Image (tube, grey):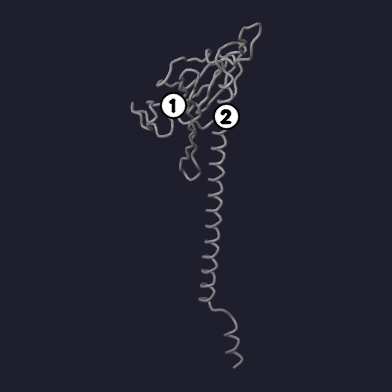
Amino acid sequence: MAARFARRAGFTLLEILIALTVVGLVLGNIVMVMRSSSDAHDEETSRATLELQLDQTLDRIVLALMAASSESLEPGASAPAFHDRMEYMQSLGVNDGKLVLGAPERIEMRIDRGEIVWIENPESVGERLATWSRWVREYLEGEEPNGVDDNDNGLVDESGLAFVLDGTQVTVMLSLERRESNGRTVVYSRTAIVHCRNG
């Protein structure tokens, strides 16, 4: 009778295998939940970063153009033409009845780098340059390089940064794009209308 009791005191090989399988399944599920939670957090962080970059860049452009003299805007072609750069001089005030303008400045998209840069005194010895944004799309959201107005905004094949001049008003359109770790592409776009100073 004692020998029979000793045999029943331990686990059988089958019971151990079943227990290990259950533990493996539970651990596998925990790892999957943690991984998907981590991926979701990374995606949300990536999207928030992109949206913040878009808002900050558009704010900088708007503030720069608000202080610009409308007469200094180049290129001067009006709507429905668009440009991927804008040159201007800020209106600093009036001295002895004459308008005082700041140094020439330029905001432009560099397609090869997917960047927006600000340049003071462009193409001169005293040139200063700052990158305002990365992840700029080659074309605005919804637009394809096909000679058609794909996004129904009255423009054809407009770039990821597009300026449209209409008198003293400049419409600024911007699309940023970033690829997430899961391979999906996230795009954010904004449009702002800026009224430049007369004179």
Q: Where is residue 88 in the image (x, y as percent from the top left)?
A: 55, 16
Give the residue type at disc 2.
Answer: Asp
Label tally: 2
Q: Which of marks 2 and 1 is nearer the N terminus?
A: 2
Q: Tell me the quarter of the image containing the C terminus.
A: top right
Q: Is residue 101 left or right of residue 155?
A: right
In this view, the residue farthest toward the top is 96
Is label 2 or label 1 in front?
Answer: 2
Q: Position of residue 171 (x, y in %)?
A: 48, 25
Task: Point out which mark residue 59 bears.
Answer: 2
In this view, the residue farthest toward the bottom is 1
Q: Which of 126 and 5 is in front in this view?
A: 126
Q: In this view, does 141 lie to the left or right of 49?
A: left
Q: Position of residue 99 (x, y in %)?
A: 61, 9
In this view, the residue farthest toward the front is 97
* Residue, disc 1: 159
Give the residue type at disc 1.
Answer: Ser
- Helix, strand or loop for disc 1: loop
Q: Is residue 152 above or below residue 26?
A: above
Q: Is residue 59 left or right of residue 154?
A: right
Q: Which of 197 and 28 is in front in this view?
A: 197
Q: Distance of mark 2 from mark 1, alpha carbons?
A: 19 Å
Q: Where is residue 134 in the image (x, y as percent from the top left)?
A: 54, 31
Task: State yes or no: discs 2 and 1 in contact (Cβ < 8 Å).
Answer: no
Crowding near pointer 2: few (<14 within 10 Å), some, many (20+)? Answer: few
Identified at 55% across, 63% down, the residue is 27
Crowding near pointer 1: few (<14 within 10 Å), some, many (20+)? Answer: many
Identified at 53% across, 22% down, the residue is 195
Q: Which of 39 and 85 is in front in this view?
A: 85
Identified at 51% across, 32% down, the residue is 135
